[in-house]
Amino acid sequence: SLETINVEFDCEFVVARNIWEGRWREEVCALYTRGGHLSFYAPLTKKPSLVVSFDEIISVRECNPDTTANPLPGLHILAIDTAWRCHYFAFLEATALESFSSKLKNSLYLTKDQAQQNKAREWETFQLSLESALTGTIGPKWASVSTGRKSHQKKQRRVLNGRRLS
Protein backbone atom coordinates (compact mmCIF):
# COMPACT_ATOMS: atom_id res chain seq x y z
CA SER A 1 0.00 0.00 0.00
CA LEU A 2 1.18 3.53 -0.78
CA GLU A 3 1.31 6.17 1.93
CA THR A 4 0.01 9.66 1.34
CA ILE A 5 2.70 12.26 0.81
CA ASN A 6 0.95 15.26 2.32
CA VAL A 7 -2.72 16.10 2.39
CA GLU A 8 -2.15 19.87 2.46
CA PHE A 9 -1.61 20.23 -1.30
CA ASP A 10 -4.15 21.90 -3.57
CA CYS A 11 -3.74 19.69 -6.62
CA GLU A 12 -1.35 17.22 -8.16
CA PHE A 13 -0.38 16.38 -11.72
CA VAL A 14 1.78 13.73 -13.35
CA VAL A 15 4.49 15.45 -15.39
CA ALA A 16 7.72 14.60 -17.14
CA ARG A 17 10.33 16.95 -15.67
CA ASN A 18 13.43 17.85 -17.62
CA ILE A 19 16.49 16.99 -15.54
CA TRP A 20 19.02 18.07 -18.19
CA GLU A 21 19.15 18.05 -21.95
CA GLY A 22 17.83 14.74 -23.22
CA ARG A 23 16.99 13.43 -19.71
CA TRP A 24 13.37 13.50 -18.51
CA ARG A 25 11.83 11.87 -15.43
CA GLU A 26 8.19 11.17 -14.72
CA GLU A 27 7.18 12.74 -11.40
CA VAL A 28 4.16 13.89 -9.44
CA CYS A 29 3.95 17.66 -9.10
CA ALA A 30 2.08 18.88 -6.01
CA LEU A 31 0.94 22.51 -5.78
CA TYR A 32 0.99 23.93 -2.23
CA THR A 33 -0.68 27.36 -2.26
CA ARG A 34 -0.60 27.71 1.52
CA GLY A 35 3.06 26.68 1.64
CA GLY A 36 3.91 28.82 -1.37
CA HIS A 37 5.79 26.21 -3.40
CA LEU A 38 5.70 23.39 -5.93
CA SER A 39 7.11 19.99 -4.96
CA PHE A 40 8.12 17.25 -7.37
CA TYR A 41 8.14 13.64 -6.20
CA ALA A 42 9.77 10.74 -8.03
CA PRO A 43 7.71 7.52 -8.08
CA LEU A 44 7.44 5.74 -4.71
CA THR A 45 9.26 8.46 -2.74
CA LYS A 46 8.10 10.63 0.14
CA LYS A 47 10.79 13.31 -0.12
CA PRO A 48 10.55 15.78 -2.97
CA SER A 49 13.30 15.67 -5.58
CA LEU A 50 12.76 19.37 -6.33
CA VAL A 51 11.00 22.21 -4.51
CA VAL A 52 10.36 25.49 -6.33
CA SER A 53 9.25 28.39 -4.13
CA PHE A 54 6.71 30.85 -5.50
CA ASP A 55 9.15 33.63 -4.60
CA GLU A 56 11.64 32.22 -7.13
CA ILE A 57 9.19 32.05 -10.03
CA ILE A 58 9.52 34.87 -12.55
CA SER A 59 7.15 33.58 -15.23
CA VAL A 60 5.07 30.61 -16.32
CA ARG A 61 4.73 30.05 -20.05
CA GLU A 62 3.47 27.44 -22.44
CA CYS A 63 5.96 26.31 -25.07
CA ASN A 64 4.71 25.41 -28.51
CA PRO A 65 7.78 24.26 -30.41
CA ASP A 66 7.25 22.93 -33.90
CA THR A 67 7.44 19.19 -34.35
CA THR A 68 11.11 19.19 -35.37
CA ALA A 69 12.29 21.15 -32.30
CA ASN A 70 10.04 19.43 -29.75
CA PRO A 71 12.19 17.11 -27.57
CA LEU A 72 9.12 14.97 -26.76
CA PRO A 73 6.87 14.90 -29.85
CA GLY A 74 3.20 14.61 -29.00
CA LEU A 75 3.56 16.01 -25.46
CA HIS A 76 2.69 19.53 -24.34
CA ILE A 77 5.46 21.53 -22.66
CA LEU A 78 5.31 24.19 -19.94
CA ALA A 79 8.27 26.30 -18.80
CA ILE A 80 8.68 27.86 -15.36
CA ASP A 81 11.36 30.54 -15.35
CA THR A 82 13.28 31.30 -12.17
CA ALA A 83 16.27 33.57 -11.64
CA TRP A 84 18.75 30.68 -11.82
CA ARG A 85 17.09 28.09 -14.00
CA CYS A 86 14.34 27.41 -16.49
CA HIS A 87 12.35 24.28 -15.56
CA TYR A 88 10.57 22.39 -18.35
CA PHE A 89 7.61 20.06 -17.78
CA ALA A 90 5.83 17.86 -20.29
CA PHE A 91 2.14 16.94 -20.01
CA LEU A 92 0.39 14.13 -21.84
CA GLU A 93 -2.73 16.19 -22.55
CA ALA A 94 -3.18 19.87 -23.40
CA THR A 95 -6.08 20.12 -20.91
CA ALA A 96 -3.80 18.98 -18.06
CA LEU A 97 -1.23 21.61 -19.03
CA GLU A 98 -3.87 24.36 -19.19
CA SER A 99 -5.39 23.30 -15.86
CA PHE A 100 -2.00 23.20 -14.12
CA SER A 101 -0.92 26.51 -15.65
CA SER A 102 -4.11 28.31 -14.60
CA LYS A 103 -4.03 26.89 -11.05
CA LEU A 104 -0.36 27.83 -10.67
CA LYS A 105 -0.93 31.36 -11.97
CA ASN A 106 -3.92 31.80 -9.61
CA SER A 107 -1.82 30.58 -6.67
CA LEU A 108 1.02 32.91 -7.61
CA TYR A 109 -1.41 35.84 -7.80
CA LEU A 110 -2.97 35.02 -4.42
CA THR A 111 0.34 34.57 -2.62
CA LYS A 112 1.85 37.73 -4.12
CA ASP A 113 -1.20 39.67 -2.91
CA GLN A 114 -0.77 38.22 0.59
CA ALA A 115 2.96 38.97 0.47
CA GLN A 116 2.21 42.62 -0.33
CA GLN A 117 -0.19 42.77 2.63
CA ASN A 118 2.49 41.27 4.89
CA LYS A 119 5.03 43.85 3.67
CA ALA A 120 2.53 46.63 4.40
CA ARG A 121 2.09 45.29 7.96
CA GLU A 122 5.87 45.06 8.45
CA TRP A 123 6.29 48.64 7.19
CA GLU A 124 3.61 49.87 9.59
CA THR A 125 5.33 48.08 12.49
CA PHE A 126 8.66 49.61 11.47
CA GLN A 127 7.13 53.09 11.33
CA LEU A 128 5.66 52.67 14.80
CA SER A 129 8.98 51.51 16.25
CA LEU A 130 10.81 54.36 14.52
CA GLU A 131 8.28 56.88 15.82
CA SER A 132 8.63 55.58 19.36
CA ALA A 133 12.42 55.74 19.02
CA LEU A 134 12.34 59.34 17.88
CA THR A 135 9.97 60.39 20.64
CA GLY A 136 12.26 58.93 23.28
CA THR A 137 10.24 55.95 24.40
CA ILE A 138 12.28 52.79 24.29
CA GLY A 139 10.54 49.97 22.45
CA PRO A 140 11.41 46.29 22.61
CA LYS A 141 13.91 46.59 19.73
CA TRP A 142 16.00 49.27 21.46
CA ALA A 143 18.41 48.66 24.33
CA SER A 144 20.26 51.19 26.49
CA VAL A 145 24.01 50.67 26.63
CA SER A 146 26.54 52.42 28.87
CA THR A 147 30.03 53.06 27.56
CA GLY A 148 33.24 53.92 29.41
CA ARG A 149 34.88 52.35 32.44
CA LYS A 150 34.63 55.15 34.97
CA SER A 151 31.37 56.55 36.23
CA HIS A 152 32.07 60.09 34.93
CA GLN A 153 32.81 58.70 31.42
CA LYS A 154 29.59 56.70 31.12
CA LYS A 155 27.47 57.80 28.22
CA GLN A 156 24.00 56.50 27.41
CA ARG A 157 23.50 55.17 23.88
CA ARG A 158 20.77 53.26 22.19
CA VAL A 159 21.43 50.17 20.08
CA LEU A 160 19.20 48.89 17.28
CA ASN A 161 20.15 45.67 15.48
CA GLY A 162 23.75 45.91 16.64
CA ARG A 163 24.31 49.44 15.29
CA ARG A 164 25.29 52.23 17.65
CA LEU A 165 23.40 55.48 17.58
CA SER A 166 24.57 58.41 19.73
Image (spheres, rainbow, N blue to C red):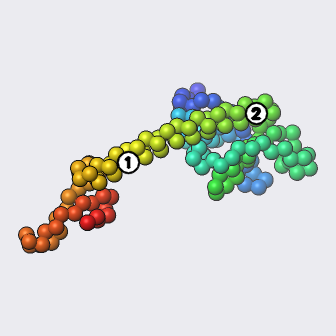
Name the image quarter holding the C terminus. Answer: bottom left
Task: Give how far across and how far down residue 148 sits, in percent.
Answer: 15, 72
Quadrant location of the N terminus in the rendered image? top right
Q: 45 or 126, which is in the foreground?
A: 126
Kindly identify the residue that appears in the image at 76 percent across and 55 percent down.
21
Asked whether, in this view, residue 127 is left or right of residue 151, the answer is right
How many angstroms separate mark 1 from mark 2 (CA)? 43 Å
Q: Nearer the viewer, mark 1 or mark 2?
A: 1
Between 118 and 134, the one lying in front of the other is: 134
Image location of residue 17, percent across then percent down = 71, 45
Residue 17 seen by the camera: no
Mark 1 = which residue?
Answer: 127
Give the side of residue 47 with respect to residue 106, left or right: left
Q: Which residue reaches farthest front?
A: 135
Q: Residues within 10 Å of mark 1 (few under 14, many from 20)?
A: few
Element carrying mark 1: helix
* Residue assigned mark 2: 98
